[in-house]
Image (cartoon, grey):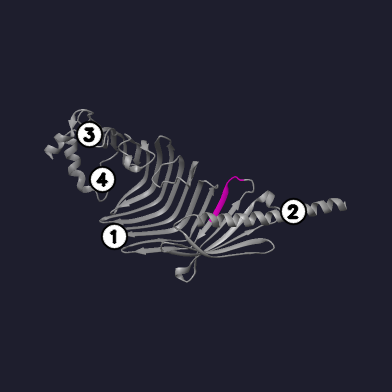
Amino acid sequence: MKKLIFIISILLVGLYGFAYIFSNHMLNSALAKLQNIKEFKIDSVNKNSSILSNNLNFRLQYKDFDLDIDMSSSYNPLFIFNGFKINGDIKDLSQDSVNLAKFSLNIPLYGGKIHIQADISPIQIIQHHSSIKFSNISINSIMDSKKLYFIKTNFDKAKFEFDNINVDMSGIFSEIEYIDGVDFADFNPYALNPSNLKLLIDNLSSNINFINLTSENIRLNSKINAYSLADIFTDLTAKYIMVNGIAFDDISSKIILKNISTSNYKNFIISKPEIVVDNLTIRDLLELKFDILIDNQSLKGLNLNGEFIAYKPISHIKGLEFISIYEKFLISNGVLIQNGNGYVSKFKSNIQNSEIIFNNSVKFSDILSEF
């Protein structure tokens, strides 16, 4: 029995010693990675250790940022099962050491994925005539030493002001899963990667020039299949949208983008993309379906095909009464065909000259000449 206790004691001491060495190595590795980034200036490095933790403090400067960063790694013999946990604080030295963020990392001993949780204090950035404000932000992510696989953010409020654009949002949640991971070394903010995206916004209010828009319960789910070219499948819904006082209820749509360049958005047309609105509906009002295939940059190769159905005249909506004269004009010219209490229109483009034709007979150019 004494031998067993002795062996266990030696094992625990050995594990404790290894935990101390590995914990210290993890903090030194984190510091080394930051020091290898040329844009970062790091100084005032202080290290100290206690019985159950290693601690690291340093100053990081980057452009207008002057940060004080504290990191501590706690350890015990059970690390072999649970891995390591690193906790940290980030303070802004340019603002009287205001606490910007707290974070924690769970690092498995045998490689695998690192789990990061961070809580960021309210942020306000004001530059020239623009400002960005965020409430407390909670971030969770999963990564390894080379790739980012998952990131989730949650914050109560956000406000943007740019010249004549004002946007207020509340109840914001986003979640991105990178199916193959995003390599940190080759990160390109304009590249499309295989991923699943979820975005929820409880309330949105915006003022863009003379357009006032408010909305509730916006839900977006998007899946990107991205290899040589990307296909993006998106479901977008909103419980309520009001534009300049004109209200619409229960909006939903399914949108598909096909053959999108994965390397750069500037190559969008070159890759011959296709845009499909599989079904855009506004409850008790209308339904719209169409697809567009773009064959070249001049848009002369535009291939359009779609259908529009109104369950009742759009002019019956409060605030849109003035369009009744246009509805009558389009009905009399065969662009809209009366259908029950509403009307319907089918449209497509002529591949040879991109002329848009309604209901197999009415040319868009003829309508313009009569308007």
Element carrying mark 3: loop
Name the mark nearer the viewer: 4 or 2: 2
Name the mark nearer the viewer: 4 or 3: 3
Q: Residue at x 53, y 57 (%)?
A: 118
Q: Residue furthest bottom?
A: 96
Q: Residues within 10 Å of mark 2 (few under 14, many from 20)?
A: few
Dot placed on the residue nearer the N-terminal end, 3 or 2: 2
**Residue type, label 1:** Asp
Above or below residue 264? Residue 162 is below
**Along the line of sight, the residue nearer the viewer: 351 or 310:** 351
Quadrant hosting residue 207:
bottom left
Residue 316: which disc? 4
Dot placed on the residue nearer the N-terminal end, 4 or 2: 2
The residue that mark 2 highlights is: 14
**Magenta part of the chain:** 111-117
User: Residue 78, position in %: x, y?
Assistant: 70, 53
**Residue type, label 4:** His
The residue that mark 1 highlights is: 163
The verdict on residue 115 being magenta is: yes
Element carrying mark 4: helix
CB under 8 Å between callouts 4 and 2? no
The residue that mark 3 highlights is: 300
